[in-house]
Image (tube, coloured by chain):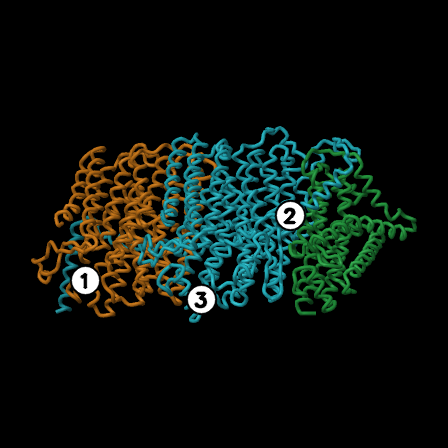
Amino acid sequence: MNTIILLMLVIPVIGAILSGYLKHKKSDISVLVTSGLVLISAVYIVLKVFPNTQERLLIKLPWIEGFETTGLFGYCIDPLSMLLLIVVALLGFVVMLYSTDYIGLKNREHPTLEGKQRHNFWMMLFITSMLGIAISPNLLQLYIFWEITTMCSWALISHFRDEKSLRAGFKALLMTFGGGIFFAIAIVIIYVKTGSFDFSALNSLSPGFRNLVYFFFLISAWAKSAQVPFYTWLPDAMAAPTTVSMYLHAAAMVKAGVYLIARIAVSSNSISFSMGLVTGIMAVVTMLVGVYFFFFQDDLKRLLAYSTITHLAYVLLGVGLGIMGSKTGILGGIMHIINHSAAKGLLFLCVGAISYSTGSRSIKDLNGLSHKLPLVSFAFMIGFLALTGIPPFSCFWSKFLLLMGTIDVGGKIGFLILIPFLLEIIVAFAWFLRVGHKVFFGEVSAVSAEAKSLPLSIILALIVLIVLCLAAPFIGMPLINHI
Amino acid sequence: MNPIDLIISSIIILLIGSGIVFLISYFRPKYVEFCGYVSLGFVSIAALEILTVSVNVFMHGPISINEPLISIPIMGASLVFNFDTLSAIFLCIIALISVLATIYSIKYMTIPYAQGLRMTGYYPPLLLYFASLIAVVTVSDMFFFFIAWEFMTLSSYVLVIFDRKNKKCLRAGFKYFLMTHIATAFMFLAAIILYINGDSFSFDSLSISLRELMSTNPVLVHVVLGLFFIGFATKAGVLPFGDWLPDAYPAAPGPASAVFGGIMSKLGVYGIIRVFCDILPISGFSETWGIVISIFAVISIFVGTMTALIQDDTKRLLSFHVIGQIGYMLLGIGIGVYFLPTNKVIATIAIVAGIFHLLNNSIYKSSLFLTAASIFYKTGTRDLNKIGGLAKFMPMTATAAVIASLSIAGMPPFNGFSSKWLIYQSAIVGGMKNGFFIILGIIAIFISVVTLASFFKFFGASFFGKLHAGARNLDKKEIPKSLYIPQLILAGLCILLGLFPMLPIKVIYSAVGDIFGSGNIPAIGSLYGDSLIGINTNFGFGIFGSWNPIIILAALVVTTLISYYFYKSGKVKERMVESWYCGEEHTDEEVRYPAHNFYLPFKQLFRIKIGKYEREGVYPTIPLPKIKFSEEGIIKRILGIDNWLYYPIVNFTLKLFKKFSKTHIGIPHVYLLWMFIGLLVGIFILYVLV
Amino acid sequence: MKVLGLGIFNLILAIFLSPLLEGIARKVVALIQSRIGPPLLQPYFDLLKLFGKEEVTNTDNILFKYTPLICFSSTLLLALLIPFGIDAPLSMSGDIIVFSYILIFSALMVLISGISSGSPYGVIGSSREMMMILTVEPVFVIALITAAVKSESLSFSGIAQWQIDNGLPFSMMVAGTALFLTILRSLSRMPFDIVEAETEIMGGPFIEQAGPKLALFKWSYYVKNLVFASLFFSVFFPWPHFDFALLNIIMVLVKIGVFVSIVAVVHSVNPRLRVDQTIKYFGVIIFIAFAGLAFALVGV
């Protein structure tokens, strides 16, 4: 088991180096093979370990005084980390498959091969770091990988190296790193007070410090997951290629923040009610803010980015509800991680396919695409239904659990959360339905009329995610049953 | 096979069929009729299976399976099926209408195909839709009920937006999906509130937790019931929640509208029956909500049908009648729910009447929608002003249309009359206990005449009168058999159920018995008399009603024979002449009396004019607001944290750095000076610290 | 057996007595207009003549051909549902709601014959007839329901029996007045002679009818005269009531004669109202009818 876990971490690094060196096709093949291997090993690990928990320290730090018993590196595979593991490995493979053709000369939005190796290199490195986060047994290791993802994010947002993307990358780096500082401070406080980096170390803190530390974690998660008040970097980060937007800024990296909070909430049972309330209220505020910005977006990707913001708030809302005493709430929040990844990933890939084939992402210009790209419109509608919670697609299940959690908390607080939550659900549904109608149905506009056909890799990636939109709850449900 | 396997396999067959038809129609778009035949195959197998189940239920009573198929412990949900007689009645309706609509589709869908529409958007969602219908009426767990329910919404939405280039259809689909989604959200809330107070989503345990809430938190009970009511009323098309219905039903292709009109809106009523009769324990709440249901019912009856009177579009006219007819069913059920705690006799008769009307309505309403589709098939238009005299070309369709129209208008001896008659009776007799219901009953009777007027216009303008000029060069052939045979079957059922009303009443009575427990309602003989051929209602305190279609019909036959004798007594000859226009020469076109001009003075009664606001009819359409947000709104400025917080901070910091960078001027002496100053500062700090 | 006997009695009454009533009405109108007027038996001669006349049609529509037949037979059916001094033959097979619907059904036959004739005048007449039904039906129904509520019975016999036992209440008086006006309309008498309106639309639905068909329509109107008169008297004013059936029958026949005369008087002294005027007129009447119902509900 140790070997496979280590291999899983090492393979993408090898892939990164290979793809950085090799040219064009060979680079593609190397990333495909390595990410495929990662997927296989991740699935193997999950099947092997589930439903138990496996934890081990591999490297300690005996040479630093005071750190003798502290683990530097190890792994902990429990249902929660399996959830993230599957998301990262599966979507990683899909996105690498997608990018083989997406970043190429036939892409009508960015018809260039320049920087493909760079893209592949950073993506593979990112997979490693994200896997590291998923299997981290303690806060220190998580923090280290956390900062690596920040770095990958910066490099990938600035991929095109024009003024806009450079600024966006810098902005993202500043904000997420700024949040990371709070993370570091929180770890230091914990270590100084308890002498341990464990997730459960929060339990042995005094209540005042516990709240403070939790709040610091919350700030860093807000920054990482683009929540109010740090949400502004995510829409700008859409300057990156769609593969990056999909993988880092919808499916995986932004999930790191909410994963951290979920992990802390699951492993320490003594966080105060007021902190749960802060988490929940801020999540609801984020939802409303995110939905408010829907109305101004003409760029499909920016629209999806704001939607991502609101959906990450769902996870935090679930965790907040869990801290306030609702078990269903927190399970719903955690399950939403995988459900949202499937749905939002599919939507991003659809938008990518649209821009690949038409060269445009503007809602105004596109119209009647379903006549030209039936598969993409089908996939988009499935993604939209999954995202807005129409049964039997993915997000419905977690949204339902969240609603149950909200009513479970009950009273004035439950009501206060419920109303904006419902409002968000309905407005988002209406807006996405409207956008879907506008873009895919109706008369064919000039831009849509020139749509080109799609390569096989993109179609395959879309089909995999359509299936995942249906299958995500079946993966998520047994996992959260054992948390 | 046991019933549960039959139901599951029918659902699975439809799902598989949907997939297969999707593949065929996607890869071979030209095989339009072939797709229809394949779908028909799957649908008829499924229909046979569910018919078997319902016959089984009719013979041996309700079947309940407590072993859950799927169980989701953290949601408290488990997939449990329960077939009581009410479900069986619905299964029968579904089996009948799904098969007929699919038969109808085979030929009909060649018309949309000729307009460039692909079958991928029609047959696959249609089969999914049938599957979800079966699930909705058999599942007895609220959670899975809602999943099936939303699936039904989803697949019907796909059917509504079938014509994807048509802006009107898209808008209708948008409105439909949005409104029903909101309604479903309400129902979810209600169900969750009950779940939190209990431990599972099954109907029984919801009922128990509702009973507990009644003593602890009565306000919450009203909230829950209100949410349920709004949710189901939206789907049923009860005004004002059913505003989407007149837009969405006409947008779907003909046979699909027939299925909508025949089944879907009735499922809203099914939900209301389940919640207010089955889940809600009999109590004071029943009285309150009985009145609420009745009031909304009568609003729908009045507004819906009055608006139908001024419509000139066939399908839109029928859609407004859907709203009106739903009102009749709910009126019966509302009266029944009101009287549940106080008078079981009136309650039972009223609820049975409501369900009976539901059964009748699904038969003639789908027939009428098929008529509208046939007219469209023949003439290519849905505008009543542009057609006329079609009886000459499609006599079979015309016959079926007249029978169905008379049924919906409640003319004896067709089936619509029997159920309406029972509803009126319960309203009048209920009104003797509570005068309020009499007003509702009178409105209902009056509107029944309006329905007649509206359908008189419908078949008068389309099948009789003079041909429209545009329709003159129509093919003289009758439409294909597969188009009019389904209608004739439905029309035959209209007559059959009209002549023998006791057969369905017996079945529906046992359905009501299943809901309340057969010991809790009066025996059937004491309610409807022992005769099988006619209904002799007995309301208990010396009030009897009687409607004996066979005897009345026999009397009519006798009187007809008498009048036929007189008619033929003169042995006169017949002579054909031209129409007489008072001596003036006219072409047929000049003397047409178009549909729009029917009942003008009456329609003008309902023209509202306040200042600039002018509107015909009583129907308050809710226009979707045009959402326009100004880019420079104050909220956006506040929420754009970048502009007032982050960018200023960053800019300030950058400026600060720039100022620092000015110290780097590249001359070694200056750096030495900095080092020296730094050293001094360091020493100073150390001095202070030590 | 009793039912059969009653049925034959009602039918004979309806078929053979009804033209006489029309004769009386014509005589009354003539008297008011200071004419001698046609003989009392003139309607019989009219019918005989029409049954022997050539049948001129302008359409081969099947409905056009058979609607007069069904109209007449359903009107006879009405006569079987109404008591003429003694029990109604079909009282156990249909109540007041059935009665009012069969009434509409017979009117519907006139309507269908109008639209299927293909003549624009016929269509206009049908449209008007439908509007009239729309206008009058609520008042008619409210009046009947008032009686039903007051007497707690849904059959004509039950209502009449209750009145004989308890006397005429105020609410039923109001309802009876409203009912009288609706009867004027249903018989197409002035001031509500809108559907046929010979001077405007030349007989409306009947414009293309000729020979036996026209005879059947005319006859069904005569029967309706009888039916409504009996409805009015047996439901709302059933006394004086005797224990001896024959006396009751004679009494009813006398009352019917009086009723027909009153209708004729109203008919001859009134002008025709326009459609919109009629609608407004009944808009007022309906409030009166509702007032009657309210009285019945509070027990007056």
Q: Are there few (<14), some (14-19), or many (20+) residues within 10 Å of tag 3?
A: some
Element under disc 3: helix
Q: Which residue is mark 3?
A: B220
In which quadrant of the rendered view does residue C219 lie?
top right
Where's residue C195, x and y in %?
Answer: 75, 46
Identify which amino acid the numbered label 1 is placed on: Val
Spatial distance from mark 2 to mark 3, Cα to Cα?
Answer: 52 Å
Identify which amino acid the numbered label 3 is placed on: Leu
The letter of the orange chain is A
Which of the chains bears the disc numbered 3? B
Chain C tint in image:
green
Chain B tint in image:
cyan
Q: Give left or right: position of A120 versus A396.
A: left
Q: Are there few (<14), some (14-19), or many (20+) residues within 10 Å of tag 2?
A: some
Q: Which residue is mark 1?
A: A188
Q: Is residue A387 visible?
A: no
Where's residue B4, x and y in %?
Answer: 37, 50
Identify which amino acid the numbered label 2 is placed on: Leu
